[in-house]
Image (spheres, helix red, strand yellow):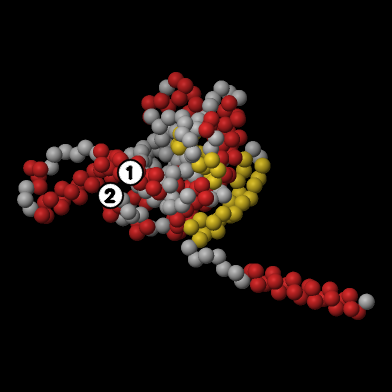
Amino acid sequence: MKLITLILITLSILACTNKKAQNTNSEPQDTTIISSDSTNNSQLSTFNFQLSKEVLLGKFNPAEDTNYVVIPDHMSTYKGLYCHREAFNAYLAMRDSALREGITLTIISATRTFDRQLQIWNRKWNSFKTRDTRHETRDTRHETRDVRLSTDIEKVRSIMRYSSMPGTSRHHWGTDIDFISAETDYWTHGEGLRIYKWLCANAHKFGFFQPYTDDPARTGYAEERWHWSYAPLSKPYLEAYRQKITAKDITGFSGSYLVDSLGIIQSHVFGITE
């Protein structure tokens, strides 16, 4: 009997020692652990995920990350689109609800990596038409520099009415989804307006909200009625972005030197409705 008691005491001491050792393990220095509660169809789910700078900036491969899933071809206009698993599950529930009312919420964009956003940015930057400044520059270095700066600012402000700088897009996270059409006119009448009204009345039931509305108090991008964000994920992602990302992290493309002086992070990353 004494032998059995001794064995039990020894096992208890070993268990406590192992637990204490596990608790002393530290997380990677560049990683934020986020806990989030999400409500979807009255079902509460709790999950943890790690957010590094690379993930927040879109510098990762969603195909190699188990938090992301491929969107089936029949639900999207492009093959090989990815979405965060939690956001996609919420989308499926919303999609089924919309289908019962004759609405098909086809996805046209979801997760976009830094490299994909860079392609979009470069295409728009290189195709941007500016005024003829030859008569303004003359031959002085000072005036040439000032005109180039003015032109770059003009480009940035024009492109960023609807498109993000690489490293600043909510699409990097896989929490935001674009539906059906990115043409403003589509959503102002007919079927597009009917779908928009349905989203305004129902999307919140599934955790989605429209980050870029026509609210005059909001800064940043123009209204995007096609863009919907899964709040239970995107809100903690945004908070992690606030804690970890600065203007120095947004670099590697034309016009990136203006991020700080134009206050791009404050005006565009945080310029949302909710």
Amino acid carrying label 1: it is Trp
Q: Is any part of residue 179 visible from this angle?
A: no
Quadrant of the drawing holding the N terminus: bottom right
- Crowding around mark 2 (Cα neighbors within 10 Å: few <14, some 14 to 19, many 20+) is some
Pick whichever, 145 or 262, lies toward us.
Answer: 145
Instruction: Please state which of residues 40 and 63 is positioned toward the viewer in this rendering.
Output: 63
Crowding at dot 1, Cα within 10 Å, few <14 / some 14-19 / many 20+, comes out as: many
* Spot occupied by residue 71 in the image (x, y as percentages of width and height): 53, 37
**In the image, 202: left or right of 260?**
right
Question: Can residue 215 be seen here?
Answer: yes
Residue 76 percent coordinates (x, y)? 50, 32
Q: For the residues marked 2 and 1, what is the alpha-carbon distance in whole angstroms?
A: 8 Å
Q: Which mark is residue 145?
A: none
Give me the residue at 13% from left, 39% from top: 132
Looking at the image, residue 73 sits to the left or right of residue 144; the answer is: right
Helix, strand or loop for disc 1: helix
State the residue in front, 220 or 246.
246
Q: Is residue 46 above or below residue 159?
A: below
Residue highlighted by disc 1: 121
Q: Can you name the residue that lies furthest to the left here? A: 139
Task: Give the residue pinned by disc 2.
Answer: 254
Q: Are marks 2 and 1 in contact (CB under 8 Å)?
A: yes
Picture quadrant where residue 89 is located: top right
Give the answer, above or below, for where 211 lies relative to 248. Answer: above
Secondary structure of the residue carrying tag 2 is loop
Answer with the quarter of the image where residue 157 lies.
top left
The amino acid type of the residue labelled 2 equals Ser
